[in-house]
Amino acid sequence: HLVPLVRPVFLPIMKDALSPDRLLNSTVLLLANLSLSVGDELRELSAADSLLELVLDQDLHWTRKSVAESIIIFLHGQKPCRQINQLLELGVIENYCIPILKSALRSQDFRGIYPHLVYSARLFRELSRCQTYAEALVANDEVLPLLFEASLRSHERPALASDSEGRQLALESLLAFLRFELWQVMAAIDTNID
């Protein structure tokens, strides 16, 4: 029932520089949740383009961007596209994906929220479904060890019901790297097993 409100209500909130921080953050978080259940509808409404404008705005403080990058990746990370290419040019892997997953694993604040493992690991799973983006992930030295860590049960942080799914998504990312024959994954696996 919320999808009809995306274009007339939610997208204008994101474009309005006078939108209060709390309203903007709540809108972005709502869209993040919607992107997991009604992604096709959000793609049809070009929601990612409005979110990309938010991300690309260099004058906007990072706290106002909330998790906009996540929504773009959830909606478009599975195949090469302009939106993801622009995020990669901005360094989305090292400046967003890795820090949010680290925050989830360490139960730390990220842009004013405490991210869940399931949502943070989903970023890597979505990007790993496209060979071009999987190669970009593997090219970063922090990604493989971080995904290995994410795939293991932690006894140091409080467990959430969704953590099992998050660990599964981390493993799916690693399997995608193998499917694309990104052999450095095999070397990393051997190193972690020994």
Image (cartoon, rainbow, N blue to C red):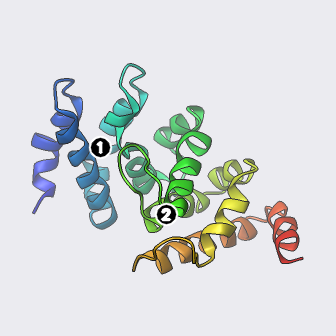
**Earlier sequence position, callout 2 versus callout 1:** 1
> Who's the residue at 61% across and 60% down the image?
128
Element at badge 2? Answer: helix
State whether residue 31 is above or below residue 190: above
Residue 16 image offset from top left, x and y in percent: 18, 27
User: Residue 81 or 169: which is nearer the viewer?
Assistant: 169
The residue indicated by pointer 1 is 46
Q: Is residue 104 above or below residue 83?
A: below
> Where residue 122 is drawn, which disc sits there?
2
Residue under the image location 35 percent in, 42 percent down? 66
Q: Residue furthest front?
A: 156
Task: Please identify, in this view, whether the residue under mark 2 or under mark 1 is nearer the observer.
Answer: 2
Q: Nearer the viewer, residue 67 or 81?
A: 67
Q: What residue is shown at x 67% (from left), y 52% (from top)? A: 137
Question: Residue 90, image x and y in percent?
Answer: 55, 32
Q: Is residue 153 left or right of residue 3?
A: right
Looking at numbered disc 2 in the image, what kind of residue is underneath it?
Arg
How far apart, in angstroms, are the residues tagged by discs 2 and 1? 21 Å
Q: Quadrant of the N terminus?
A: bottom left
Relative placement, left or right, of 117 versus 175 is left
Residue 185, numbered circle: none
Image x and y of residue 150, in percent: 60, 68
Quadrant in which residue 119 is drawn: bottom left
Where is residue 40, by image quadrant? bottom left
Looking at the rendered structure, the kind of residue marked 1 is Ser
* Mark 2 crowd level (few <14, some 14–19, many ≥20, 10 Å Cα): many
> The C terminus lies in which quarter of the figure?
bottom right
Considering only vertical position in the picture, is 85 above or below 119? Answer: above
Q: Are marks 2 and 1 in contact (CB under 8 Å)?
A: no
Please state the horizontal and vertical placement of residue 174, each as a whole percent of the image.
Answer: 68, 69
